[in-house]
Amino acid sequence: MKKIAIIALAWSVLGLSSVMAESMVVSKVSDDLSKVNLNSKVWQGVKEYYFIAYPQTAIEVIDADVMKLNAENKAKKIMVKALSDGKNIAFLLKWKDASNSVQKGYSSTAFGDGFAVQLPVNLDSLPYIGMGSAGRPVIVHLQKATGITYEPNGNGDVYHQVNSGNQNAYGKDLKAYTEDVAKLGNGNYQRSFISEGFRSLTQIRDGSEDAKMQMHYAKGVWTGIIVRKLKSANLDLTKGVFPVAFAFWDGDKKNRDGAKVLSQWLEVREKGSAAKLAYLDEMTQGDAKHGEQVMLENCASCHQYKEVKNAPSFMAPNLSNIGGYSNASYLVESIINPSAVVVPGYNTQAHPSYPWYTIDDKGVRTSMMPPFDGLDQKSLEDVVAFLKTLKAEVSQ
């Protein structure tokens, strides 16, 4: 068994050097990271790590434009640095994007670039990569590129919530109104959520999981940071090692919700820590060629993946990039206990004959996929080895 590695890749366009490592080691600093920003000198000289974020393909977004714009998506190379001052953890990320897309409050068809950081509440088990899972909640910190928006401030102020085009003001009065909105408005969209599976994403409003996030775009590259406490009401990241996952949205391709690229769970480790996350050990054994044959015999009637399209797209999750953003332990669990994480599926009114799960009177969802717990160990390892090969080509 081999500990998961954050893959180091050459990225000459950014002038970044590659560092191969089996885990992301946090650099310790004496600076107060609660005051750090994108341009702080504390980032200089910090070790760079690289990982790949893959297009999420489990479910097709019900938007023809989105499907067309993202049909040929490739995986993205991401650079990350990690710092800790003993009280806070900070990540700096860089990723390429052809355009600076900003979400405007007056448009329902313009979407902003953005990124998210996901951290598990319980370090003893591995949650689903996208949204947590039942009994395995995650904290999600989200930052999006937005224009200035005005939100209700609790003071009963509804005057400044009216679109300037509908405001009863002209000339100097309209200019003054627009300036007031800009002063009161928020141009830095960031939110913290807790989630325990699909359709459970809930914003945390009490400040217990607040994080500082920033984004800056220049010369085709986004730089983003997140700074948050190592220990809070829901999280305790002081054990020496913890997993983290990252997601990225491209507004120019109308990315939102599940239309994104995301990493698998990555290991963050304090220097010298002996703590382990057994579920991030990757299976190194397995005959992918034999696993492909087992897949054809047992899975192709429901799942699509790469060139295998025997089943309709709404029959079951598409596995075309499953190997990129899923850890081996998650794949094993999905095969032998598919109800551990239940993907929501398509509109049951549109496809009433193809539900992905049933719901009992207590609201518990049970996957329609039968458990393949009867597979022998070799076949299981071979299938996982093949699934790990299912991933998009990496963009240059």
Image (tube, rainbow, N blue to C red):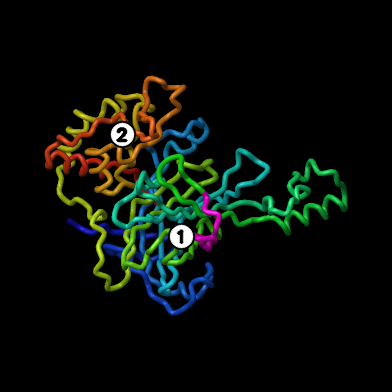
Q: Residue at x 57, y 44 (%)?
A: 111
Q: Is residue 273 magenta?
A: no
Q: Is residue 395 visible?
A: no
Mark 1 Cα shell of 10 Å, populated few (<14), some (14-19), many (≥20): many
Q: Which mark is residue 94?
A: 1
Position in image of residue 389 (x %, y %): 26, 43
Most common secondary structure along the magenta stretch: loop
Q: Label 1 sits on what residue type?
A: Lys
Q: Answer with the quarter of the image where residue 294 lies.
A: top left
- In the image, is 203 to the left or to the right of 336? right
Q: Label 2 sits on what residue type?
A: Tyr
Mark 2 Cα shell of 10 Å, populated few (<14), some (14-19), many (≥20): many
Q: Which mark is residue 305?
A: 2
Q: Residue at x 26, y 28 (%)?
A: 300
Q: Residue at x 37, y 57 (%)?
A: 244
> What's the magenta region?
203-214
Return the residue nearer the eye: 49 or 173.
Answer: 173
Quarter occupied by the N terminus: bottom left
Q: Is residue 211 magenta?
A: yes
Q: Which mark is residue 55?
A: none
